Image (cartoon, grey):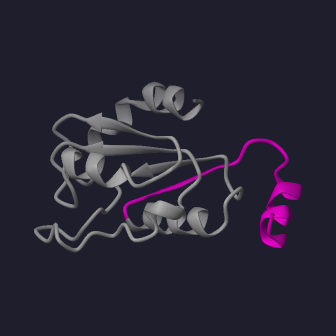
Amino acid sequence: MSAAVAEVRKLAPRRVFAGGSSYGGRQTAMIAAERPGLADGLLLLSYPLHPPGKPEQLRTAYFPQWLTPALFVHGTRDPFGTIEELRTAIAAIPARVDILEVPSAGHDLKQAARMGRDILARMLF
């Protein structure tokens, strides 16, 4: 365990969850991959798998080092990646990961505001 992870664990001795929306979620996941043990779980809202219209520019190079369980909350109309593209990409993540689909939602995930119970239930593994 790195010194930074040990310091966080002193401040937060219980379960630690981290997350973010879009680029914030991507940055959170990158830090978690670099520092395993920093968080017990990740909540990633609208993960930007690739730039809109550029599916060949995947943002997944660090996925094989990712050891923190994660829940992706993703709209079925998100231009930053389809549900199918996301399912294919997360197969490279060795940690336990899941996707909660938000029907008809785009990148803004407005419909997810009514899904709090579902999100919480999935986060508590």
Q: Residue at x 84, y 71 (%)?
A: 3
For this rendering, which residue is in front, 1 or 118?
Answer: 1
Left or right: 115 as drawn, with respect to 30: left
Q: Is residue 106 above or below residue 28?
A: above
Whether residue 32 is visible, yes or no, is yes
Q: Quadrant of residue 81?
A: bottom left
Q: Is residue 71 above or below residue 63?
A: above
For this rendering, which residue is in front, 37 or 101?
Answer: 37
Left or right: 4 as drawn, with respect to 78: right
For this rendering, which residue is in front, 112 or 58?
Answer: 58
Left or right: 21 as drawn, with respect to 35: left
* Start-end of magenta stretch: 1-22
- Quarter of the image with the N terminus in it: bottom right
Q: Position of residue 76 (x, y in %)?
A: 19, 42
Left or right: 39 as drawn, with respect to 92: right
Residue 35 magenta: no
Q: Residue at x 49, y 69 (%)?
A: 27
Q: Residue at x 37, y 61 (%)?
A: 22
